[in-house]
Amino acid sequence: MRTPAIKTPLDDTYVYLIKTEEDREAFWHWLSEQDALAFDTETEGLGFHDPLRLLQFGNTTEAWVLDPHDNPDIVETVFTHSAAWDKLVAHNAAFDVIAIGRMLYRDNPSMLIEFVENTVEECYDTQIMSHLVDPRDERDGGVGHGLKPLSDHYLGAGAIDGQTALKNKFRSLGLNMTTGWKQIDLWDEDYVLYAGLDAILTARLEEILVEKVFTELNLGDQFNFDCKVAAICAGMTARGVRVDMEAAKSTLAALTGEEVTARQNAAFYGVENVNSTSQVAEALLVRGVELTEKTETGKWKVDKEILSSLDDPLAKSVMTCKAANKAMKSWVEPILTQGGILGRVHARIAALRARTGRMSISEPALQQLPTDDYRIRDCLIADEGMVIIAADYDQIEVRVMAYLAGEDAIISAIKSGVDVHSSVAESLYGSSFTPQQRSLAKGAVFAKLYGASPKRLAAQTGVDELEAKKVMAALDRNYPRLARWSKNTIEKARFRGGFMSTPSGRRLPVDRGHEYKLVNHLVQGTAADIFKNGMIDVHKEYGHLLLLPVHDEIIMQVPEYQAEEIGAHVCELMGGVLGEVPITAGYKIAGRSWGDAYRPKEALIA
DNA sequence: ACTAGGAGCGCG
DNA sequence: AAAGCGCGCTCCTAGT
């Protein structure tokens, strides 16, 4: 007996359920007629360990919804006996492939990683395509990269909003967005309808986006490149990083102690809640501290920079308390929670997240671990017999800027192996420049890189505004190609609007009124692609050792006895030339724990 | 009760 | 003339 199909709000499109043997037979027949196959999953939640609930397949007019646990043969045939259809289509393939892989290879981490890498790379991922067409998210004024906004925009399917519909459904059942996904009946009419629709929308999006990416924009190579990167990143998520549970517990205990002491101290001065900026400001004013800066909304500004300039016991307690609290809540507790499941943290690594093409890591945010407190990184360690190493590019953004600007004066300094910032300082102040002058020169280069005003440069380096202005002007005078490139970039952006592209072809949207940002975006985006390129090359040789990407540095674990050898080789693989500009990398060996690279000398003994 | 935005802070 | 860039996360506050 066949289970009745569900008619969807889209014209002539249906969702079929696989519940009976007859359903299964009909599905196999349908499957044999597909060449492009979109798939999607529903899970109990968004975390790495949350199990699969439903698996959906679809084309542009039909979807099939099944319980993967009841149909392991279907899952295996589609995902492990490839080549029966031309392509697999998914929206953010990494998420679904990991969920499917976890079901297939529950007890075999290395098989899981291999499966994830191979399958993600093979997918036509509509999220990657979306990003190549327009990298902006909704907050930035772009279309966004979720299935819903993309369907609204490209398919005019605005009426379909599974998220909202299901949220309401959850509510009517006494559930919420956390419990609902886990507890709603597997065959709930709305649940399976929207599950199936997502596969259909993905299939429709793919048709439109493939045309745009491959034909209109000629970004086929860029797409394949980003698929490769996405696959490597998904593999790293699947591999995870080993957690040192004992270290994590003791870090948590130490931070808790610091937090409690600092909080009591702050309370003594009248601040019940250190995270309330109004309380902090009020208490400081009462103590006779002079505050001068206000925020955009007119409240007293009491950020770390201001507090640290105060030399006040309350200010110190507030800073200590906030730092400890942030470290616990953002990193140590999430690491402990995830580590408690299988001993590893499987952070989500988004291969194509920033509008410049940079990657991001979340749950937890492992690209943002504090550098001044090794105890956080101490929670993360290499596997048995291995050590953590970090290989990072040398001044990648400055080199990219020199290349993009064709600034020979900087390029020749780089080529001759001279420190770039010293070379700039020498050109500005002569060969007897002071360390302060080097630091100001470095600041000026970064100001150029970010499009900062002399005012900002002054604030950051401590010189007065006039001095900052003079330095910026001198920089422009001594490096005329850099000045011209920056100026031309901004003018071109103003004139043309729309999108501009990096040399590798990545499209960067122009923000009206903020054209100066293009200078930075071109540099950051090009640097991101160089990094990804290096990561791909390292992956070819040492894929099984990759742990995390951190903007311009690759974190790996390597067998202890080969650490030097592999480190050096990895740097060779990362390096290359950008036109005339040499691109180089260096490595450092941390130790069994990542924190070993950040441990101050005194702490090494203890 | 839940949401959105602001403020703040961590990194490259 | 003026402009620091890109992220993720947590907490607070004010809104519904």
Image: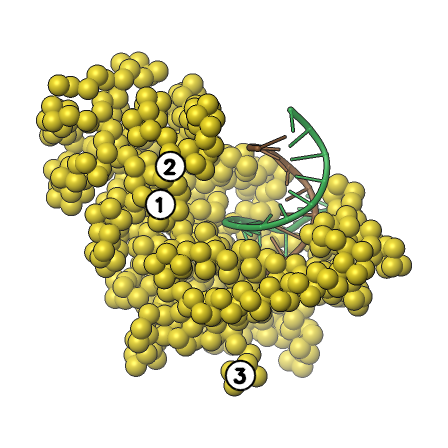
Chain colours: A yellow, B brown, C green
Q: Residues within 10 Å of mark 2 (few under 14, many from 20)?
A: some
Task: Tell me, yes or no, whether dots 2 and 3 are on the same chain.
Answer: yes
- The residue to which callout 2 is attached is A182
Amino acid type shown at disc 1: Asp
* Residue A409 x, y percent position in the rendering: 54, 68
Label drawn at residue A377: none
The mark nearer the N terminus, 2 or 3, is 2
The mark nearer the N terminus, 2 or 1, is 1
Q: Is residue A526 above or below residue A297?
A: below
Amino acid type shown at disc 3: Ala
Q: Residue furthest front?
A: A174
Between residues A75 and A427, which one lies in front from this camera angle? A75
Mark 3 belongs to which subunit?
Answer: A
* Residue A587 x, y percent position in the rendering: 41, 74
Which residue is at a point 89% across and 59% down the rendered structure image? A288
- The residue to which callout 3 is attached is A606
Task: Tell me, yes or no, whether dots 2 and 1 are on the same chain.
Answer: yes
Describe residue A365's horizontal placement relative to residue A437 as left or right.
left
Q: Are marks 1 and 3 in contact (CB under 8 Å)?
A: no
- The residue to which callout 1 is attached is A50
Mark 2 belongs to which subunit?
Answer: A
Which residue is at a point 64% across and 67% down the rendered structure image? A258
Q: Are marks 2 and 1 in contact (CB under 8 Å)?
A: yes
Which residue is at a point 23% across and 31% down the rendered structure image? A66
Mark 1 belongs to which subunit?
Answer: A
